Image: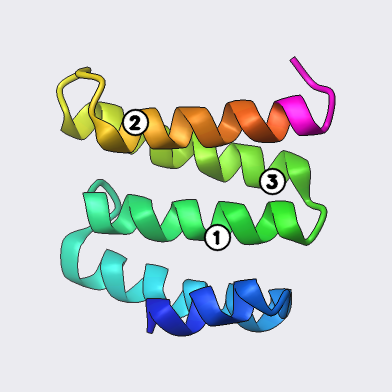
Amino acid sequence: VGNLGQISVRQERWEEAMETYREVLKMCEDVYGRRHAETAKAIECMAAVRVGQGNLQEGIRDFKEAHQIFIDLSGGADDRHTSRVRATMASILSRYGKK
């Protein structure tokens, strides 16, 4: 299902991508709960769609939530997930002129 979301993102079909990722998030929450890496990845995907839609504030909020989940799961260690989300947020904020 997540791959369908990626295809929609590449084609900039934002509403379709968001609907797909909402379904993925619901499945992840049902199976794993809110504080799980797979759930955080779904939140991260939704964040990217929100930014693509121009909803910067909501996108950053979701990126922060995903980042916090990854931090909590890693025991505060800087792993590949936390690094990726942090770099993505920095890139977005830099692109839109926010600090």
Residue at x 40%, y 76% (from the top left corner): 2
User: In the rendering, at what x and y percent does residue 18 appear?
Assistant: 61, 73
| Residue range of the region highlighted in magenta in the rendering | 94-99
The one nearer the camera, 67 or 85, is 85
State whether residue 29 is above or below residue 89: below
For disc 3, the marked residue is: 58
| Residue 46 included in the magenta stretch of the image | no
Q: Left or right: 29 with respect to 99?
A: left
Which residue in the protein does label 1 denote?
A: 46
Residue 47 location in percent, x, y? Answer: 58, 52
Q: Amino acid at mark 3?
A: Glu
Give the Cα distance between marks 1 and 3. 10 Å
* Figure quadrant of the C terminus: top right
Instruction: Name the secondary structure under disc 3.
Output: helix
> Residue at label 2?
82
Image x and y of residue 17, in percent: 60, 77
**Which numbered circle lies on residue 98?**
none
Disc 2 or 1, which lies upstream in sequence? Answer: 1
Q: How far is disc 3 from disc 2 in space, using C-alphas?
A: 19 Å
Q: Is residue 89 left or right of residue 55?
A: left
Q: Residue 49 sits in which quadrant?
A: bottom right
> Residue 46 lies in what quarter of the image?
bottom right
Callout 2, which amino acid?
Answer: Thr
